Amino acid sequence: MTDRTTIKGGEFLIKEIDIDDIFIPEEFDEETKMIADTCQDFLETEIFPNLDRIDKQEEGLMAQLLKKAGELGLLGLSIPEKYDGFEQSFLNIMRANEALGSGYSYSVAVMAHTGIGTLPILYYGNDEQKNKYIPKLSSGELMAAYCLTEPGAGSDANSGRTKAVLSEDGKHYILNGQKMWITNGGFADIQTVFAKIDNDRVLSAFIVERKWDGVTMNPEEKKMGIKGSSTRQIFYNDVKVPIENLLGKRGEGFRIALNILHLGRIKLGATVIGGAKRAILHSVNYANERKQFGKSIAEFGAIKHKLAMQVVRTFATESAVYRSSKDIQDNILRMKAEGIEHGRANIEGVADFAIECALMKVYGSEALDFVVDEAVQIYGGMGFSAETPVDRAYRDSRINRIFEGTNEINRLLSTDTLLKRGMKNDFNLFEIARNCSDSMHESENIDGLSYYDEKKAIIKNLKKAILMLIHGISDSFGRKIGEEEEVMMNLADMMMQVFAIEATTMRVKKMENMKIKENMSVYFDILDVLIYEAGFILYKAGKDAIVSFANPENQCDMMKAIHNLCKIRPVNVKDARRRIADKLIEDNYYNF
């Protein structure tokens, strides 16, 4: 059995996972459910009745709603009690993020405040800074924003031109520059601003207060979606930042930015689950109510196909995100037990799983985009009307593939980080990959096995396919591998599919062992459809990669190997999808 505490980020590719190594959402305790219920009740009473007012950006409304959340303790879930917070486990925080994730623009504002807005100060601030700002950020008395992006510096954040120069008396940094796409920019009292000191090549970070002279901003941006979220350009014109408001060490800003983004990515993975479940609720409610040809459209096979795939993608995302979250939580607790202080343990505990954070951000955001797109289609012509709830869901979803680094950047980051860790011998990636390449035509037999043994064999084969490609790609491109972005993204697509398949398999198996459900058949259907669909994605991505790097001599061999390793037993997915949809239709909400 694998010891949870020894699992490193990215090692899922080379380690066999035992059922006890997986946390599943069904294991959440009553305390967690109470937190989630509080979040849901807040949305039902304060957010959903006011969605139109929020989208119109009624003056002061969003800040007022955030303050109300602070009064309930919902802004302080990550904050220790010594700073007036209600510090919860990483898993509980993720579950709260999921619950709030169905709040459309509000969820963007609250996640920005509690995440990238507050956590840089909590994790990198000194005692004076934390005592001054964190209690008020926890209560909602102060609001927070994260100011990294500039007109000429998006994905390449370190190319930012905002400058800070030490004043002649040595008491202030004089800040000049411009930031854009700043969430909560219109009302945030506290801003974490990234700038280069003098002629430094790397960023530093500063805590800036909006009330200071020289801080100005443009009007609100007009956006495709998340219209209720305040998004502004902010300008800094000779802003005098006290030297004590330097956050962390000089030149540490880039590291702060990256580490906070790792955290934002995995949290976004939880947030989109909430959005997906709400979109499914609207989809099935409408399908049950809408009549055509004398019966509800939920009775038609084409609609059942859509409803079922909404469920499959959401269930898989949920399984994978909470698997990652428990690994991260275990890592944080291990570090704390070793005497590492709170902030560093949280930051490094997450950063160790940067690969999984990036993959879950991509997998989850694309799952939500699929779910809301199908929701619009289920509504048909009405789905194109701004009067229906799926209009807002569709528009608001699109930003998630851009937030926290674009999905393209995150695909590249996941594979690049994996390869670099292999090169540093963090784990024996390349040795195992070479062995897989040498034995590429050997695969686990999937015929005649029991249900879970078959899934286990499939997962082993799919991992071997990825490792075989890692060896071939590394051997072919060497140090220039980073320039082969398309191939790197092929690998990322394969990795996230395998991670989700394995997490979902272990979840279903654990559910059955724990006797959580009387009838497990629909969960077998979900897993069967997921693996059937994912097998084709892996096969195509693998073929695309092979023809991009393999020479004519071994291309044929590798094509045969990838065909064999991506073999999936035929499944009657039509009937399986119908059974999944039938449960959803009967319950009339996501109840999986």
Image (cartoon, rainbow, N blue to C red):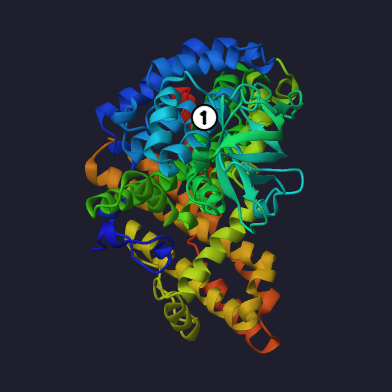
Quadrant of res 234: top right
From the top left corner, tell me how far across and down residue 284 is, in percent: 55, 25
- Position of 74 with respect to 113 (left or right) is left
Residue under the image location 49 percent in, 73 percent down? 467
Check disc 1 and report its element: helix, strand or loop: helix
Residue on which disc 1 sits: 113
The answer, for residue 583, to whether it is visible in the render is no
Q: Is residue 27 left or right of residue 294?
A: left
Q: Is residue 200 visible?
A: yes
Q: Above or below — where is 561 with respect to 572? A: below
* Residue that sits furthest to the bottom in the current view: 553
The image shows residue 46, relative to residue 244, as above or below, that is above
Camera-nearest residue between 139 and 245: 245
Q: Is residue 513 above or below residue 439?
A: above
Check the image and name the residue furthest to the front. 169
Residue type (three-letter) at the residue carrying disc 1: His
User: Where residue 226 sits in the image (x, y, percent)?
Assistant: 66, 27
| Residue 454 locus on image (x, y percent) | 37, 62
Q: Residue at x 27, y 57 (%)?
A: 4
The quadrant in which residue 480 appears is: bottom right
Which quadrant holds residue 352?
bottom left
Tell me if 33 is positioned left or right of 435 in this view: left
Q: Residue at x 28, y 47 (%)?
A: 510
